[in-house]
Each structure stands twice: as C-alpha cells, then as structure tokens.
Image (cartoon, rainbow, N blue to C red):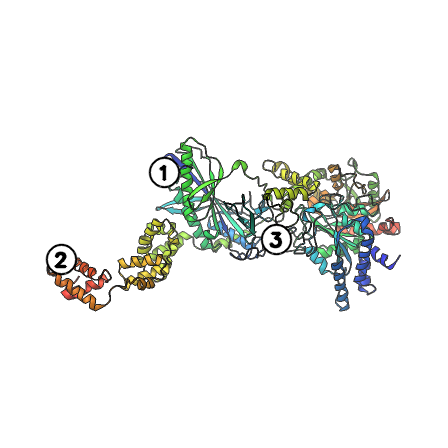
C-alpha cells in the first residue's frame, strides 16, 4: 500500500468529486428481542439470554416484537420518512455460524420507512442528507475466533459463538448517495452520524453506543473526475465504529482511491475493512465473490400493516428534533453558532452541558473545553470525550480558580494532574503543592518588598500610569514562585498605594 | 378376540369411554398398544422410537386424575402415534433425517403440549419421509414403513409411519403433517380418515419446517368422529405462531356427529373435472375413479346435489408446488449445519468450518432432500427469482381464484385423494416425477390453504381408496359433516367399517 500521509483531502477534491453514502445499524433498546421474549441486556454471561426461537432450533417460529415496529416507525417519522402501510419481512440467506438459522430475518424490497432526510450543519453551512430507507432486522450472534493471527475465522484454532445478541432488533438506516460536499465529505459524514445519534438518543430508542456496537456504520465512498456526469465505482468500508473513524474512513478512502485513479488504476467494487489503529482500510471481499442472498418474503411472519391512525399518534408524540433542542440549549449556554456547531460535531456538547450542570459558568466551560482541553485532544489525536477528565472535574477546576485557590497558570498544572490520573482537582492541588500562597505574612512582606524595591514604578502608578502595576505584580509572583493569586496581590498593592487599579 | 386386541382395534371414542367408565385403566390400554407395537412393528416399521416409560407415565397420570375424581377430556388415556416432525421435549426428534440423530429437543411443540394437556398418551415418534419430503416414507433416513393392508406396499407419505400405526392397530390416533398431501394421501392408501386443516388453523410452533407457507399438522383416525376430536384438541390460535389464525376452532366435532345422521339435503357437491374427470383421467386408476364415483352416488342418495366444476389452473399446481416448497425448504434446512446440534462429520481439528458443514450435509441429507435444496436454491437465485418463485406465487393466486369460483357453485368439492391405490415399495423410487404425481389431487388445497379431508370410499383390488372432500378456508367443519355422512352410509351398506377388511396376518 502506498503511503497516504502527504496527500490531503483538498488535493483530492482539486481533481475529483466525492460521493459518499452511509448505512447505519442501530440496536434498538427494546426490553425483549425482535422475535422472542429473551432479554436484551448487554454484557450478560454468554448464551444465557437465549431460547429455542433465537437459537433457531428446529420447529421454533418468530413472532414480531411490536415495540420494535413502533421504535422503527418513530425513527422513520423523525427522519421525515414515509411509513409503509403494508410491508413484509424477508429472509436473507447465507451460512455463518453466528446466525443460528443460517438466514437473517430482514427486510428487502419492502422496508418499513422510505424517503426521508436529515439536515446537518457543517461550518455554518447546512447539508441535507437524504434517507433512502429505514428497515428492521435481527442482529446476529457474536463470534470469537480463538488462535490465528488475524482474529478472523480463517486461520483460527476454534471459534466461540455467543447468541445473546442474536435476535436483538436492529434498524438499518441507509442514506441516498451524498454528492456535492467536496472536501467537506469526511466532515459531513461524521456530522450526519453525530446528528443521527443525537436524534436516536432523543427518541430514546437505543443507547447508541458505538464503542459497544449498539450503533455501527458502513461507509460508501466513490470518486469521479471533477465535473464528470457519472459517479465512480464505490467501495464499502465496514467496521467503522466511532464518530472519528467515520470521518477518517472517508478521508482515507478518498485519498487511497485518488492515488489509484492518479496512477491510471481502476477502483474495484468491494468491501473494505477499517482499521482504527492505522486509520486505513484494507480490501475485503469483492463484488464478484459476493453472496447471492436469495431474498424471499419470510413465510413465518404475516405482513406488517401499521394502522395509519397509530402512526399519526406516534408522529404527534415525537419529541423536539435535536436541532430545536440545540437552539434552546445554545441560548441557555450562551454559545455562538460556530461554537455550538463545533461542540456538536466533536460530540462535546454533552460534556459541555454536564460541566455547566456541575456548577461551572458557561464562560468557564467554554474556556476549558474549547481552549485547553480541545488543544490537548487535538495534540493527542483523541476525542474530547476520550480525555481522562469528567465534566464534574472540569467544573471543580473552574471552582478552584473562581475561589482564588489557584490561578490560571496553576490551574493548567492541576489539569495535567487530573489528566495524568492523579485524582480530583483538590487532591492534585494538595499533592502537587499548587495552592496559591495564602500565608498573609509571607505575601505581605513580598508586597512590601516589591513596593520598597521599585520607587520609580510606584511613582508612575501614583501619577496614573496604572499599567505599571504589572512590574510590582511580577516581582511578587517571582518572590512567591507563582503561587500567589494575582487578583489578591493587585488588591493589596492598590490598598497600600491608595489608588484604584 | 382377546380383551387386548379389542383395545387395539377399537375407536378412540370407544377406548376413552372404557377408561372414563373405569372398565379399563389408561395404563392397561397403553400397555396393550405397547405389546402390539412389540409384536407387529417389526413388520410395519411405523415407529422410529417408542417412548415406553413416557407413555406409561402419561397413562398413569390419567388414571390418577380419574381416581382423584377430576374430570377427563374426551380423549384422555387414548394412545397416539406422533409423527417425528413434531418436536417433543426430552424425546429425540429427527424429522426422519440422519442429520438430526441424537437431537433431544428442550421444548414441546404447541400441539405436543396440547396433546399432553388433553391426557392423550404419546406412544412414540413415527417414521416419515425425511423432512416430510415424499409420498411413501421411502425417503426416510431410517428405512420405509409398510402398509398394513399389504406389507409390500407403501403406507403413503410423508406421514406414512402414523398411517401405518393407526391402520395397523398400533395406535387409535395419529398425528401427521400435510404440506402437499402428506396426511390425506397416507390416509387414503391405508383406509383411514385424515384431515388437513385450514392453513393457520393448527399451530406450526414446534413442527420442523419443510415449507412454512404450506405445512399444516392434522389428525389421523379410524373414524371421522375420532379424527374430529383430535382436530379439536390440537387446533386453535397460538401466540407463538404468527400465521396462526385468531379465530374460534370450527365446530368439527359437532359437525362429525351431525353428519353421521346421513342427511345431505341441499348440499351442493362439486366434482372437480380437472382431478380425474372427463379428459383428465390420465394417471388415475380406473378402480380409484370407480370407487370415488360410487361415493359421489352415495352422496346424491343422501340428498346432495351433484355438479361438475372446472378449476382450470389446478393443472399448474404440481409445477408451482415444486418451486415454492423446495424454495422455502432450501432456506428452512440451512440451519442443519453441524454447528449447534445433530450430526457433525469430518471435524478432525484440521478441516475448516465450510468443509465440515459440507461433509455433514452430504452425509446427513438423503437424495430427495438434496434434490429439493438444489431446486429451491436455484429457484431463489438472483435473476431467476421472478421466473420461478415469483411465477409460482402467481399460480398460487390463480388456484385460490379457481377455488373461490368453484365454491360459488358448490359447498364442497370432491375428488380422489390420490390417483392410485398404494403402490409397491420401490416402484417409484427411481422416478421422482412419478412419485410427485401421488400428490396431484391434494396439492391445490395445500397451495390455497383451504381444508380438505380424506375419507375411505371403498376398495380397489383389495386396497383402500380415499375420497377427498374440500371446503373453503375455516369451513373445516363442512369437511367433517360430509365425510361423516359418507362414512355412515358406506359403513351401513358394507355392514362394517372398511378397516375390518384389513387382512389378518
Ligand atoms: Zn430468544
């Protein structure tokens, strides 16, 4: 594989137009599975949440979980989609051990919801992402391949399968091709998934935890020479399981494809695997080897025909959309449009709001999250949420500064301590000895010394050149090795000199 | 006749009455049947496994209930032969296939649970064509069953173990499943009554699926009334089967009782031209047509108005069926992959999953099952789906329309249940198409999901012939009423039930 580091997305879009598409799988948060009564709790002992139906035992039959239908319709409505008045489940046939029946009950040409859209904001610009379909299916079990180098089934010594996940209701949300985003394509992809996640969270239909796999993305990417009428051949990148990875997967595919095309090569329609560690993709199976799923209508289930009156009830009961909620929140938090959209797209709005809820002012929350913490996340190449600091700790830090217990410079050291896992901000202050000098005797003499040592500066201040106080301040700070609270020192000087500072 | 042999030749109603009156215990009845199985099943091979302990325990429970003064159901203590396609908790269930040898289900099918709750005693699991694919039991993974009328002939299929058991005196009641005729054809060739209920009338939960949109479980009995009583026991809405109909069970027992009076005044009987009528008699044995014709005359004598009806699309039923059923089967049988249960071949620690899966399916499935999996896989393939599966579904719609039109002109439709009497074992094993022809008359009602019963019409060359009576969906009671009238009139004319003519070995 050619190294891609020297090429940027802007280089790519100078010559090519990208078209992207996203397929998002979301595990619904129903109490029971899609076609049986088994619980859906995450993290239970393997194969303890199973029954004849979700194990696909001979003779067992599926029965539709109406709650899953309801959740899917609510998702469809929130995405401005049309809800089918009659549709069927279909069998998708292929052999794989984590699928107990060796077919998956899914939907094929008759999805429950079609033709919706979701608007996303990127750099204060709105993009409308059109939704092709929203359909309902059952999740598969989870395989663990033991032995072998790759963790894949090929080369494994043996494999273990946990069927707890088999039969959990899974919604697939498929966009139409998204064109015209240019170099913003990776960011738009990420913004879409972020917005979708917010929407699903607001509907309370899923816990949408990408790290636990309850929300998973496949990303389609293609390039066509700039201005060309026809779109290029697309690849489908699987296994994209964080917001950051969505953006990176698109970027890496755009760069890879542009190199292939630049060298006169041809893009192969194929599935590619995304690797979190290297932010790159590798080839999976090509379309030529793709399985023929032999879809046909599931004969064990009767068609789904949602009563239009019920659909209208569900529509009327929908919560406010994320953008409406965000508008309210933005006003509450006193954020600018740009700040808001940055917080949303970095997934940090929740962190921000929780920091305010924990007692920090909006100004302090903004100062820390958009300032120091954003810089550190960027430097370490991680998400804000991945930093080892909680909103409560950020609020605690802000409180220390507001109370005059530490100054800004010390606060940054406290932050270092918290991020290094040294405990709560107060504990870091104590263990690192970072408290501002509050021994008034020591501070008094430092101030007195500074005044005595700098008669010209004192004269300047008294004559109205108050900015000169900085010299005295610096002198006091030097004497206290920085551990004095600047505001208190300033007040002491003002009092001694009988001036307003 | 010894006491024991009268127990094994009686009807379910008679046996239940003896038990209820305390003249015989359920344990004695069960033991008599177990003894009969021990002496005769070597020749019939009706059972794949006999559950001696379980049967005696169930019988004892009925006796205890009676002793405690609890009220008993109408079939309490009556033994039953259960087709091995029906899942039984704790009792090996193979669906006639080597691929499932050793599988002990952890749950009961809905009908198993209903049979047990009714106090009916399950003697064991009966032989069948593998995964219910066949018309003779010759496709069983464990060797064929034999017809009690002539041990060299087939007992029908796929439910041939149950028909052989009930006709052969090993059990007064039997359960079969009917996908394209697998209850009606075995009933016809063994001189029994057998009913395929309206699709959705009996729960499919716990039937090992062959073709999901066609499979229906149903009863075998020696009389129409016995059959109706068993039907009522197993039928009714089941929340575990989405395709189960949320409607009351048709009053089949009342209809069987009412029909026995023999009055069919005002009933319009439609003889289906395309099923053995003028111009459509190819492949039908004259003796079969004669016997069925006589039964129709008997119906006329009971006051029925006989009309001829035409169902022009019935001729496409066989072709449609052999696309739809294999298509669904190819998917239903995918799960037998050596991973979770049943047979596993070639797992030597070196071979990969795909190879073990292939070797297992190669060794575990018989040739007919493989043939249908291949046909079905092909028919569902991308690019062929519309031409095969799609077209077949259209034919299915046309057949339903034929039925709708015919039921405008007649209250019930009649035909032979199968074109021939029981054929000799081995006669058609090399010719799948000839084998498939056994289902010519039964396929239309299967595809339309409508109820149909087979009731004996008489003998041809000493072998039983069945009359098929078809009714509209959910009018199963009509099948029973007309069948009971035919049965009582023919029994009266003959002076005894047809089964009494079964040769004593
Ligand atoms: Zn389950």
Pinpoint the chain carrying mark 2.
A
The answer to whether dots 2 and 3 both sit on one chain is: yes
Asked which secondary structure carries label 1, the reply is loop
Lower position in the chain sequence, tag 1 or tag 2: 1
The reply to whether the C-beta atoms of the residues labelled 1 and 3 are less than 8 Å apart is: no
Q: Label 2 belongs to which residue?
A: A465
Lower position in the chain sequence, tag 2 or tag 3: 3
Query: At 69% from the left edge and 58% from the top edge, which residue is drawn?
Result: B113
Q: Which one is in front in this view, the residue at disc 1 or the one at disc 2? A: 1
Pinpoint the chain carrying mark 1.
A
What crowding class fits label 3: few (fewer than 14 Cα within 10 Å), some (14-19), or many (20 or more)? many
Asked which secondary structure carries label 2, the reply is loop
Residue B35 position (above or below residue A221): below
Residue A366, quarter of the rendered image: bottom left
**Relative to the observer, which residue lies in front, A337 or B95?**
B95
Q: Quadrant of ligand 1?
A: bottom right
Residue B132 as seen in the image, left or right of residue A316: right
Residue B160 as seen in the image, left or right of residue A82: right
Disc 1 to disc 2, C-alpha distance? 54 Å
Q: Label 1 belongs to which residue?
A: A7
């Amino acid at each position: 594989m050619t190294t891609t580091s020297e090429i940027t997305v802007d280089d790519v879009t100078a010559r090519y137009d990208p078209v992207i598409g996203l397929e998002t799988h979301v595990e619904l948060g129903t109490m029971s599975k899609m076609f049986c009564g088994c619980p859906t709790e995450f993290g239970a002992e393997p194969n303890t949440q199973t029954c004849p139906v979700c194990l696909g035992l001979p003779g067992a039959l599926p029965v539709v979980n109406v709650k899953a239908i309801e959740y899917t319709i609510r998702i469809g409505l929130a995405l401005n989609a049309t809800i089918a008045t009659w549709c069927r489940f279909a069998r998708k046939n292929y052999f794989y051990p984590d699928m107990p029946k060796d077919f998956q009950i899914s939907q094929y040409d008759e999805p429950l919801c079609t033709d919706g859209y979701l608007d996303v904001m990127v750099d204060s610009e709105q993009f409308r992402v059109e939704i092709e379909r929203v359909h309902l299916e059952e999740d598969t079990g989870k395989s663990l391949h033991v032995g072998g180098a790759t963790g894949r089934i090929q080369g494994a010594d043996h494999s273990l399968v946990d069927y707890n996940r088999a039969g959990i209701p899974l919604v697939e949300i498929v966009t139409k091709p998204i064109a015209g985003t240019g170099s913003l394509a990776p960011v738009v992809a990420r913004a879409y998934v972020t917005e979708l996640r917010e929407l699903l969270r607001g509907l309370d239909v899923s816990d949408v935890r990408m790290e636990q796999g309850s929300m998973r993305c496949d990303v389609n990417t293609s390039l066509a020479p700039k201005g060309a009428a026809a779109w290029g051949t697309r690849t489908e990148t699987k296994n994209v399981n964080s917001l950051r990875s969505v953006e990176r997967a698109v970027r890496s595919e755009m760069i890879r494809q542009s190199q292939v095309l630049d060298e006169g090569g041809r893009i192969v329609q194929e599935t590619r695997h995304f690797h979190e560690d290297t932010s790159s993709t590798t080839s999976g199976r090509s379309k030529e080897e793709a399985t023929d799923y032999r879809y046909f209508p599931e004969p064990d289930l009767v068609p789904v025909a949602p009563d239009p009156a019920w659909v209208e009830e569900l529509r009327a009961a929908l919560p406010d959309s994320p953008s409406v909620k965000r508008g309210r929140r933005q006003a509450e938090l006193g954020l600018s449009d740009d700040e808001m959209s940055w917080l949303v797209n970095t997934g940090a709005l929740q962190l921000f709001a929780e920091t305010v809820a924990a007692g920090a002012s909006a100004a302090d929350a903004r100062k820390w999250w958009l300032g120091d913490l954003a810089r550190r996340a960027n430097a370490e190449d991680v998400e804000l949420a991945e930093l080892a600091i909680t909103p409560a700790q950020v609020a605690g830090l802000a409180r220390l500064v507001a109370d005059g217990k530490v100054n800004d410079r010390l606060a940054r050291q406290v932050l270092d301590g918290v991020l290094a896992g040294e405990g709560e901000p107060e504990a870091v202050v104590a263990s690192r000895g970072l408290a501002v000098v509050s021994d008034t005797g020591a501070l008094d003499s430092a101030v007195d010394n500074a005044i005595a040592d700098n008669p010209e500066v004192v004269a300047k201040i008294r004559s109205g050149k108050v900015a000169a106080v900085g010299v005295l301040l610096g002198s006091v700070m030097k004497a206290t090795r920085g551990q004095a609270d600047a505001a208190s020192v300033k007040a002491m000087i003002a009092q001694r000199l009988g001036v307003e500072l | 006749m010894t006491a024991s042999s009268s127990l094994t030749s009686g009807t379910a109603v008679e046996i239940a009455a003896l038990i209820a009156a305390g003249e015989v215990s359920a344990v004695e009845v069960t033991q008599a049947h177990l003894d009969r199985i021990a002496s005769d099943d070597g020749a019939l091979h009706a059972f794949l496994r006999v559950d001696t302990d379980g049967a005696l325990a169930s019988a004892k429970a009925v006796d205890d209930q009676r002793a405690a003064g609890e009220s008993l159901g109408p079939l309490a203590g009556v033994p039953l032969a259960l087709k091995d396609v029906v899942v039984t908790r704790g009792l090996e269930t193979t669906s006639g296939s080597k691929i499932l040898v050793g599988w002990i289900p952890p749950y009961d099918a809905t009908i198993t649970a209903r049979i047990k709750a009714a106090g009916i005693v399950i003697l064991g699991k009966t032989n069948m064509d593998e995964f219910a694919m066949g018309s003779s039991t010759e496709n069983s993974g464990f060797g064929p069953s034999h017809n009690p009328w002539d041990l060299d002939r087939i007992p029908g299929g796929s439910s041939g173990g149950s028909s052989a058991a009930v006709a052969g005196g090993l059990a007064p009641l039997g359960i079969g499943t009917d996908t394209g005729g697998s209850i009606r054809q075995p009933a016809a060739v063994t001189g029994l009554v057998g009913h395929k209920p309206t699709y959705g009338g009996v729960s499919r939960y716990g039937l090992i699926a062959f073709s999901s949109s066609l499979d229906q479980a149903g009863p075998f009995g020696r009389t129409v009334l016995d059959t109706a009583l068993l039907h009522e026991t197993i039928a009714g809405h089941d929340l575990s089967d989405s395709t189960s109909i949320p409607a009351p069970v048709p009053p089949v027992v009342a209809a069987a009782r009412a029909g026995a009076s023999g009055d069919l005044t005002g009933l319009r009987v439609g003889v289906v031209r395309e099923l053995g009528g003028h111009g459509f008699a190819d492949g039908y044995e004259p003796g079969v047509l004669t016997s069925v014709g006589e039964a129709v005359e008997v119906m006329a004598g009971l006051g029925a108005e006989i009309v001829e009806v035409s169902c022009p699309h019935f001729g496409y039923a066989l072709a449609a069926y052999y696309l739809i059923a294999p298509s669904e089967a190819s998917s239903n049988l995918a799960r037998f992959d050596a991973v979770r249960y049943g047979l596993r071949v070639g797992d030597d620690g070196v071979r990969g999953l795909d190879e073990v899966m292939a070797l297992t399916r190669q060794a575990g499935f018989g040739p007919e099952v493989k043939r249908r999996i291949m046909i079905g896989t092909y028919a569902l393939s991308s690019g062929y789906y519309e031409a095969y599966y799609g077209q077949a579904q259209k034919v299915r719609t046309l057949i339903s329309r034929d039925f709708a039109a015919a039921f405008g002109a007649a209250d019930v439709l009649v035909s032979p249940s199968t074109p021939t009497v029981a054929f000799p074992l081995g006669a058609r094993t090399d010719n799948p198409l000839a084998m498939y022809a056994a289902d010519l008359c039964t396929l239309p009602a299967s595809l339309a999901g409508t109820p149909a019963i087979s009731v004996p019409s008489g003998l041809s060359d000493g072998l039983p012939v069945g009359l098929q009576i078809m009714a509209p969906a959910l009018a199963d009671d009509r099948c029973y009423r007309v069948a009971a009238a035919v049965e009582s009139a023919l029994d009266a004319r003959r002076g005894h039930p047809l089964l009494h003519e079964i040769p004593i070995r």
